[in-house]
Amino acid sequence: MRSRSGSGRHSITIITHEDPIGRGPTNYMIHADLSDRQDGWREQLWTRQLTEDRFEVTCLPFFTYGICYLDVVTIDSNHLVTSVVQKSGHRTLRVALVAEHQDRDQLHDLLNGKVVEAALPHEWLQGTYLSVDLPPGTDPAALAETLKAPAQADALHWEIDA
């Protein structure tokens, strides 16, 4: 989901998480700047505050590269991520379904079933973007095999980020 907010003369688009895996009553929202890919875009990240300036990521980033579940980050005075100070060892499998593809709904159901069957924490955004947590030691080969044919048919795009 995207929400627009005005900040002076610049428009900012914030990509928000609909159902973060680590949602809790004390979550702290920060943002990752995505303007290197799309001017004015930010991704909202759910975190758990560890110290005054350190936060543990408790969601699965959809568009922010180099940050995964349980990584520890620092922020600036605008609540924007400045650096990753501790990697958790988790990786993120990201899938973007092609919204106009005739098999999109079937692929959504297939992929959702596969990640549930594998008992992997995951998040969906608008039914089109999927982020899957790959804890340390997780072999993504079975999921990658499921993604090959649809990717070759231009029905989806996927990647693994660490």
Image (spheres, rainbow, N blue to C red):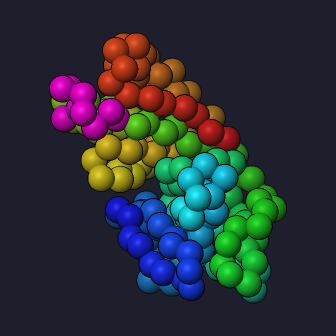
Residue at 44% from the left image edge and 29% from the top image edge: 157
Residue at 56% from the left image edge and 27% from the top image edge: 139
For residue 118, side relative to residue 72 (left or right) = left
> Residue 21: x percent and y percent?
43, 60
> Residue 60: x percent and y percent?
51, 54
Q: Quadrant of the C terminus?
A: top right
Q: Nearer the viewer, residue 9 or 80?
A: 9
State the image quarter where residue 7 is shown: bottom right
Q: Nearer the viewer, residue 59 or 115?
A: 59
| Residue 19 can be seen in this image | no
| Residue 8 can be seen in this image | yes
Residue at 28% from the left image edge and 47% from the top image edge: 127
Vertically, is 77 above or below 125?
below
Vertically, is 46 above or below 110?
below
State the image quarter where residue 51 is shown: bottom right
Vertically, is 162 above or below 61?
above
Residue at 56% from the left image edge and 75% from the top image edge: 10
Q: Is residue 59 magenta?
A: no
Main SS of the magenta segment?
A: loop
Q: Quadrant of the N terminus?
A: bottom left
Q: Nearer the viewer, residue 101 or 139?
A: 101
> Residue 161: x percent and y percent?
62, 39
Magenta span of residues: 97-105
Q: How many marks?
A: 0
> Residue 13: x percent and y percent?
47, 67
